[in-house]
Amino acid sequence: MPKIEVNEKLFFQMVGQKYDYDTLEKKLTCGKAELDEKPDMSQSEDQRVIKIELNDTNRPDLWSTNGVARQLRVHGGGKPADYDSFLSREGAFKDNGGHVITVDPELKDIRPFMVAFMIEGKPIDEPMLLDIIQTQEKLCWNFGRKRKSIAMGIYKNSEIKWPAHYKAVDPDKTSFIPLTFDSPMTCRQILEEHPKGKDFGWIIKDFKKFPLLTDDKDEVLSMAPVINSASLGAVQVGDKDLMVELTGDNMANLMLAANIVACDFADCGYTIRPVKVEHPYETGFGKTVCAPFYFQKSTKAVLKNINKLLGSQFTKDQVVEALIRMGNKVETADVNGDVEFTVWPAPFRNDFLHEVDIIEDVMIGVGLDNFNAEKPNDFTIGRLMPLTLFSRKAKNIMVGLGYQEMIFNYLGSKKDYIEKMNIDDSKIIEVSNPMSENYQFVRPSIIASLLRAESGSANAIFPHKIFEIGKVAYLCEEENTGTRTRQSLGFMTAANNANFNNAASEVSSLLYFLDHEYIVAESDDPRFIPGRQAAIMVNGKQVGIFGEVHPQVLENWSITVPCVAGEIDIEEVMTMSSAEIGSAKQAKAEPKPVVNQKSEAETNPVKYFDEHIELRVAKITKVDVNPEGDKLYIETMDDGTDTPRIIQSGLRPYLKEEELLGKHVIIAANLAPRKMKGVESRGMLLACDYKENGKEMVELLTAPWAAPGTLIVPEGSDPSTPKPAKLDADKFFKVTMKIENHKMVLNGVALTADGKVITTEKSDNCEVC
């Protein structure tokens, strides 16, 4: 996650008030941030640096001193700034004052887009300059994919001769003095010799021409995205009236980055002046763009859904206030008896895609501290889903076949998922506002992920056998959402002898151990070699495919060895389980006569007790209250072993702690452990109930004469009879123990401890529980 360093004095000036560090830690939650490191208190306030970690990569506007400060200021009740004075909108450009940049047509396939604006006002001081540099690096490195999609330059406007020109130049014939150097170098030399050229030259080195920004006197400002010039591009403390430009390959991201930087400067008291950039080709915002530019669309949410998702009872006014505290503009309307909110995000945000995003802003705007914690009302038992169990079974089989499991991202680029795989994009899910083109599409298949791993594994010893079981998703008209997400198994082998027959034998083994019958059918998947691939068919439906990977696909991935790969829809296979089909057939067969037989627990409960149930005496040595359970005691016991036993009981409403402490009670010792309210209970205390003055009372079953560990057995039974170490509750309760004539009995046979019958003082003619 991004981390930023902020000058303490500058930061609190922008917030509008000063907090101690503990308070600041709490306040930062409204910006999804936390205090990463406190300043060195031996330094003066002017020198102290606060380190903050941001936990949301969807909010690049927070990656600066003013970004976080603005969030705290507005969330704390400060009035949101009005940026309309410098924001252009569709069909309504602000006056650019004659500041124009022209773009060379040859840049369309090199680095096509540019936006720019002016900063005027007070001189730049040192903390502000350091923050500008940090903002530039964070935006361009994180949001701009290491400057590939976004690079930013800042220049002294007073020395620029307008109009400026963004053009494509011959890198071997064009020279200028780069920043931190004192002699001219060609553009090609800069890539080879300058530190920044070595760091970022990879972005443009393969193009025949390089992008260059000059003024009308042909004075160089920068070679985007690598380095500024040492003249116009050398901004220092005390400079004023600056020009900011951003270049890249995604106009929407450039516009957002420009808005972020412009709003940051506006909040610091600077005047923002637009710059018009004239492209000779379409940008998605028109050929002529004027930044800063408000391009965000509104998003809607209804009050009922907000309260349902947050478990709240907010009013219309409370929701509006919360959204305004997050810097949004809001309009409300009554629609079908509910309140509908139309929300326009601040110009520096572009993270609203869905109603849920508005609901999240409401939650943060209200403040997390204003939501009361609620305990779950229902007790549930966690268990693995059938699909998870089936997937684990498939994993074990694949490992047994010699494959190594991999885990990949579900998001990727068009180049990886579509272009390199030779497939069309008709069913591919595209993310509306990706942070980067590397995470723009949801993968429709695991095979691309496997090939990507193989493309970087040429130095590893062959053969390479890898697989993954994970999610894939694609467009599907049959679903209400228009998309379908499935659990899929993808596998790949890379080796000199990898071939169709090997893949076929492994598919056969896999489906055999998954208890499936299948057939293969002809397939024409462009990812595989024609005639060397097959569709996997179960009950007439295709559930997968395998084959030899097409040479063109291997070349696209720079893979030099033959590969076989395949993919199987695990969910489809599970629902078509041949075992289930067999069960269905058996259910349809003619039923056999059923003989109504009683279980052993019913016909001979004493024998069943001897063979299954272990009761023993235990001394209660400690009694605690479970804070999570209103009725639960946590009793620590000596059960005759060397290990203390913990048992929980719901006796708090009936018995005081001192009435339990020191008692020699009777416990179900081999009852399977059960976790209740965060504590595992290893057994159960035996008791019985009675009424006294019309009130329900509980009496413990005790054996004060017997030492801890003494076994409870029916009269005449052998206490050494072996019993299971763990007994499920349903098996324990198959027999019914009772109190008759104040004696504990089982089917009329008295139960004893050390030869003496267990008795009660008050309870009688009732069941033991």
Image (cartoon, rainbow, N blue to C red):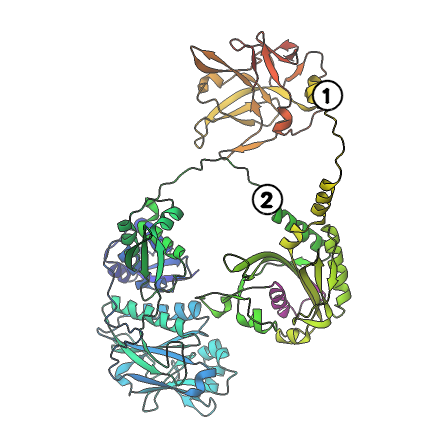
**How many numbered circles are shown?**
2
**Magenta span includes 51:** no
556 or 645, nearer to the observer: 556
Report whether 587 appears left or right of 188.
Answer: right
Residue 317 lies, in percent from the top left, at: 26, 50
Question: Looking at the rendered structure, which numbered label has been put on residue 362?
Answer: none
Whether 345 is drawn above or below 720: the answer is below
Q: Residue at x 63, y 25 (%)?
A: 732
Residue 103 lies, in percent from the top left, at: 38, 85
608 or 163, nearer to the observer: 608
Residue type at mark 1: give it: Thr
Residue type at mark 2: give it: Leu
Give residue 129's quadrant in the image: bottom left
Task: Identify the residue position indicated by label 2 in the image.
Answer: 384
Give residue 16's quadrant in the image: bottom left
Secondary element at image label 1: loop
Whether 699 is drawn above or below 135: the answer is above
Secondary element at image label 2: loop
Task: Identify the residue position indicated by label 1 in the image.
Answer: 721
**Mark closest to the chain's N terminus, 1 or 2:** 2
Which span of residues is magenta-colored? 445-465
